[in-house]
Amino acid sequence: MSGVGWLLDFLLFSLLIERFDVNAFWGNITSASLSVTFVFFAATRKVFLEVCVKSKGMKFFIYLLYQLCSIILFSLLIRLIAQLLVPVEGIISINLELAGKVICTPFSLATNYIFMRLLIEKWSFHRSSINGGAK
């Protein structure tokens, strides 16, 4: 799911900055927000079949808070990398914001994977634990 989410994110990011001239920061905020929402629901669908709705809402809230911080951080990093790449702009013909996004991708995927794994596997809130063991 992370790969599909990344593809969605990257394609939307590319479209926003190339076709609609959105700056990299806001383009990444938009594309990443949509893709992380998709990944959360797609990747956790099976896991949440046995988790109560209240718990699912809490995990989604925690996930959104984490992603908000992560997206803002990586959006700033993409912009910084693009600015650092300005001296090589004449040497290579690539959109600097896209290059920044590609450079940030492995770090973004790794941190998201670690967080999702902790959220899903380690911080489980099952009905039995919420209801004091009653079924």
Image: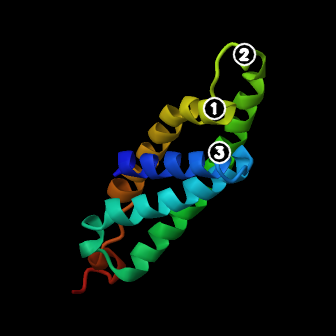
For marks 1 and 2, give the CA distance. 13 Å
Residue at the disc numbered 2:
88
Q: Residues within 10 Å of mark 3 (few under 14, many from 20)?
A: some
| Quarter containing the C terminus | bottom left
Q: Which x, y percent locates residue 113?
A: 41, 45
At x 50%, y 48%, the residue is 11
Residue found at x 51% / y 45% = 10
Alpha carbon separation for disc pair 2 and 3:
19 Å
- Residue under pointer 1: 100
Mark 3 vs mark 1, CA separation in Å: 14 Å
Q: Residues within 10 Å of mark 2 (few under 14, many from 20)?
A: few
- Circle 3/circle 1 CB separation < 8 Å: no
Three-letter amino acid code of the residue under disc 3: Glu
Amino acid at dot 2: Val
Q: Earlier in the sequence, mark 3 or mark 1?
A: 3
Q: Is residue 33 visible?
A: yes
Return the x and y of residue 98 as percentages of the image width and height. 61, 35
